[in-house]
Amino acid sequence: WRGGGEAWDSEGGTVRAAWERRLFELSGPFAAKQTKDGVGTIEQWAVVWRTCGELVVFLAGGDEYDELILLDEVFPLVHGIVLEHCERKLTETALLRSDAYGKVIASLEELVRDAQLFHNSLETVLRLSKLKK
């Protein structure tokens, strides 16, 4: 997930599919080695990924959001959001059940605004995302 999804809304699924293809091409060699973490770049974007149970979380950032910030600051927040809304079950089934996915997206939108990390407290993000309902 890249902050600032406005471009995806205006350009449609083609841009999203191309981005996802590039992510999987980048992470493919690491997946073959069964590594849980990975770091790479796509154009100007720093990309990190980490497994969480059955899920793989990709984070991408530019400028001041380098690999260290993404892994040390942003990933724990995203991991906490997914854990909370998936009731501590890190599986595809738990994520895609009727209300969990929407709650995760609402929390991510609260976490990042205008491609900037807006909150750095998991409790604040969860509280504010509940108010959006």
Image: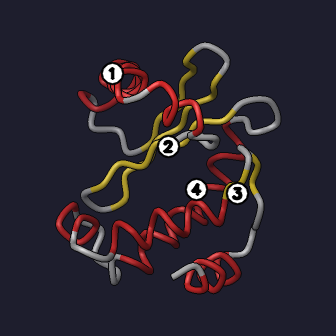
Ranked by sequence position, the earlier of labels 1 and 4 is 1
Q: Residues within 10 Å of mark 1 (few under 14, many from 20)?
A: few
**Which residue in the protein does label 4 denote?**
75
**Which residue in the protein does label 1 denote?**
21
Q: Give yes or no for contact between labels 1 and 3 (Cβ–Cβ under 8 Å).
A: no
Question: Rounded to the nearest whole Å, what is the CA distance between mark 3 and mark 4?
Answer: 6 Å
Residue 65 sits in quarter = top right
Question: Rounded to the nearest whole Å, what is the CA distance between mark 1 and mark 4?
Answer: 22 Å
Ranked by sequence position, the earlier of labels 1 and 2 is 2
Check residue 39 in the rendering and tell me which mark sits there, or answer none.
none
Ranked by sequence position, the earlier of labels 1 and 3 is 1
Q: Give yes or no for contact between labels 1 and 2 (Cβ–Cβ under 8 Å).
A: no
Q: Give yes or no for contact between labels 3 and 4 (Cβ–Cβ under 8 Å).
A: yes
State the image coordinates of residue 70 (x, y, percent, origin top left).
65, 46
Ranked by sequence position, the earlier of labels 3 and 2 is 2
Q: Secondary structure at mark 2?
A: loop
Q: Give yes or no for contact between labels 3 and 2 (Cβ–Cβ under 8 Å).
A: no
State the image coordinates of residue 8 (x, y, percent, origin top left).
49, 32
**Which residue in the protein does label 2 denote?**
1
Describe residue 69's horizontal placement relative to residue 106 as left or right: right
Q: Give yes or no for contact between labels 1 and 4 (Cβ–Cβ under 8 Å).
A: no
Question: Rounded to the nearest whole Å, what is the CA distance between mark 1 and mark 2?
Answer: 13 Å
Question: Rounded to the nearest whole Å, what is the CA distance between mark 4 and mark 2?
Answer: 12 Å
Describe residue 41's horizontal placement relative to residue 116 as left or right: left
Ranked by sequence position, the earlier of labels 4 and 2 is 2
Q: At label 4, which amino acid type do we have?
A: Phe
Q: At label 1, which amino acid type do we have?
A: Arg
**Relative to 87, is 2 above or below?**
above
Q: At label 3, which amino acid type do we have?
A: Glu
**Relative to 10, is 106 above or below?**
below
**Which residue in the protein does label 3 denote?**
73
